[in-house]
Amino acid sequence: MKLLIMEDDVAAARSLKEGLEQAGHGVDLAHDGDQGYALARQGHHDLWIMDVMMPGRDGLSVLKALRDEGRRTPALIVSALGEVDERVEGLRAGGDDYVVKPYAFAELLARVEALLRRAHAFGGSPETSLELADLKIDLLSRSVIRAGQAIDLQPREFRLLEYLMRNAGQVVTRTMLLENVWEYFFDPQTNVVDVHISRLRQKIDKSFATPLLHTVRGEGYILRAER
Amino acid sequence: MSGMWLFVMILLLGAMAAGVGFWWVRRREQKVAMLRERLVTVTQCARQTGDNIAHDLRTPLTRLRGDVEAALRQDDAAAHRATLERTLGEVEGMQSIINALLTLGQAEAGGIRVKKRPVDLTALLEEMLELYIPSAEERQLRLEGRIAPRMLIEADRQLLARIFSNLLDNALKYVPAGGLIMLTGAIKGGRAEITVEDSGPGVPQEMREKIFERFTRLDSSRTIASGAGLGLSLVKAFARLLQGDVTIGSSSLGGAAFSVTLPASAASVSTPFPR
């Protein structure tokens, strides 16, 4: 995938570029809003990563202009401002997701992958079920079956599993889970997500030979069939 | 005669003008005095906060510097990696202090725009229980709720959740295994009152006023692992942003009781006794 980073801090942009290239993506860099706008308009990119505060045109007005021209490339907004209303403003300007500086690279990468995947999943008819190996969830009856055996989940556990299934094969972070499963935009001090994950793991993995839900140390969780 | 009247009139007007002038000057003086007092408090507060920040950041910085210098004297890749990992941990700790301070500064200066919407407080508190009960059980604690039905308030859901999450984080941190934490919510006299109380060690009387101040911790060890001592300051600032407040008292369970009061919506059902 080809990504465009708009970031005025040259050192930050360089380490971000290196990280994303190591993850297998092609990366173009722009160091101010005008350059970013010009590059984005060429239409070569699968995702834009834009810093809000840049010299010249700021990230949000660049994004707004691009959206007004009908460009639908997914955009990840990166901002030093972390409050909820700033996030809302970013999403209103046309952003698809939002990370706060200084972020962990793993957090940013996980969100980039989730956005790229979501963009490619669009277009088909809405799914009524999701499957991974011998695990199957029915989104209409909200039932879960593994290897022919019904698994009883609480409503929140179902949402957690659904989110993991939709992002199967990719790392999701604790923050992503809090935002998407609980709709909380802050990180509690207690390891609340970890405990919910371990309960879900008990239910979907414990009595089966192959574990599906794995911990990725220092990053988050991943649901996948192979180890 | 008319000259006399004129003289009296002038005298009266003069006296009135003098009175108004005097009143105006006094009012200004009072205002100036009030402003001066406020400024002194703010300056003291800022100085104290500055000192605390310096202390709180200097401790991890000292560790970090020592660690990095020691690593530079070595020539061992594994040791370098371990140092980098510890460095990242220290950086994350400092980051969370700075983030909390920025949020706190913004909240206290009214810089956070509060988007008030009708919030189903009953549902929110039940969600909080659902989110925290597994973590409580993991620590061998019981977390229970007595939450009145159909409580509606005009508030910001994220700020509310941050308030209760901070209070529950605190309780989970301080209540020893085997203890009980109780989350209560009810409407009393047109206000919603939400209490997080526990069977823990409680907060000594002399600490109760200080506990909402920045960098106050019950344990005197100033390590990042024990938290920066900003959680309760944030709770207070958020409660005030929502035209509410938070107070601390003793719980009948034996420990601390933190009570948050918030303006309730007129649509709420008044339920003095939680179910």
Image (tube, rainbow, N blue to C red):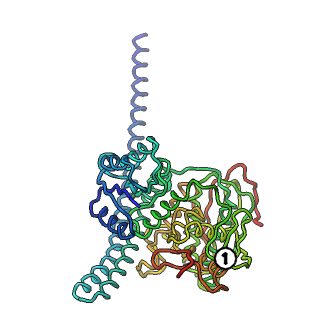
Residue name at image x 63 percent, y 73 percent:
B197
* Residue A180 against residue B26 in the figure, above or below: below
Residue found farthest to the top: B2
- Kindly identify the amino acid type of the residue bearing the numbered disc 1: Leu
**Is the C terminus of chain B in the top left, top right, bottom left or bottom right quadrant?**
bottom right
- Residue A158 sits in quarter: bottom right
Position in image of residue B129 (x %, y %): 66, 70
Q: How crowded is mark 1: few (under 14 residues within 10 Å), some or many (20 or more)?
A: many
Q: How many marks?
A: 1
* Residue A129 against residue B143 in the figure, above or below: above
* Residue in front for this viewpoint, A218 or A141: A141
Q: In this image, B179 relative to B173: left or right?
A: right
Residue found farthest to the left: B73
**In which chain is the residue bearing label 1?**
B
Position in image of residue B265 (x %, y %): 68, 51
* Residue in front for this viewpoint, A40 or B188: A40
Residue that mark 1 sits on: B143
- Residue B201 sits in quarter: bottom right
Q: In this image, A60 relative to B61: left or right?
A: right
**Is the N terminus of chain B in the top left, top right, bottom left or bottom right quadrant?**
top left
Position in image of residue A220 (x %, y %): 50, 74
Element carrying mark 1: strand
Residue name at image x 38 percent, y 44 percent:
B29
Residue name at image x 65 percent, y 62 percent:
B124
Position in image of residue B110 (x %, y %): 46, 52
Q: Is residue B37 visible?
A: no
Q: Is residue B158 visible?
A: yes
